[in-house]
Amino acid sequence: MSGGVIAGLVVGDLLLTLLIALAVYCLASKIHGRRGAMGTTPEEVKKSHGPEAESPYQELQGQRMDVYSELKKGGANY
């Protein structure tokens, strides 16, 4: 390949990379702009989902010794 072809490939690659970066930036700013259009800041959003939100996790009920004693009685059979 000649020097001109290589230079064209490099310039084209750089332009494509800049185009992709610009597209990502525009999409990210639109998404961020929608949050601001609702009239709430990210801090207010975090506060609104505070303790009132139900947790998907089950609370711990303490240690149950009967479960662990059953495991110890069986022994290791492997």
Image (tube, helix red, strand yellow):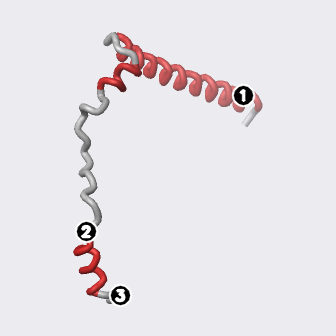
Mark 1 — residue?
A: 7
Which residue lies at the image location 70% right of the left edge and 30% below the top edge? 5
Identify the disc placed on residue 64. Answer: 2
Image quarter where the C terminus lies is bottom left
Query: Where does residue 73 sit, x and y in percent of width and height?
Result: 27, 86
Q: Amino acid at mark 2?
A: Arg
Q: Amino acid at mark 1?
A: Ala
**Do the residues under discs 1 and 3 have CB atoms within 8 angstroms?**
no
Picture quadrant where residue 8 is located: top right
Local SS, label 3: loop
Which residue lies at the image location 65% right of the left edge and 30% below the top edge? 9
Which residue lies at the image location 31% right of the left edge and 87% below the top edge? 75
The residue mark sitting in front, 3 or 2, is: 2
CA distance for labels 1 and 3: 64 Å
Mark 3 — residue?
A: 78
Local SS, label 1: helix
**Do the residues under discs 1 and 2 have CB atoms within 8 angstroms?**
no
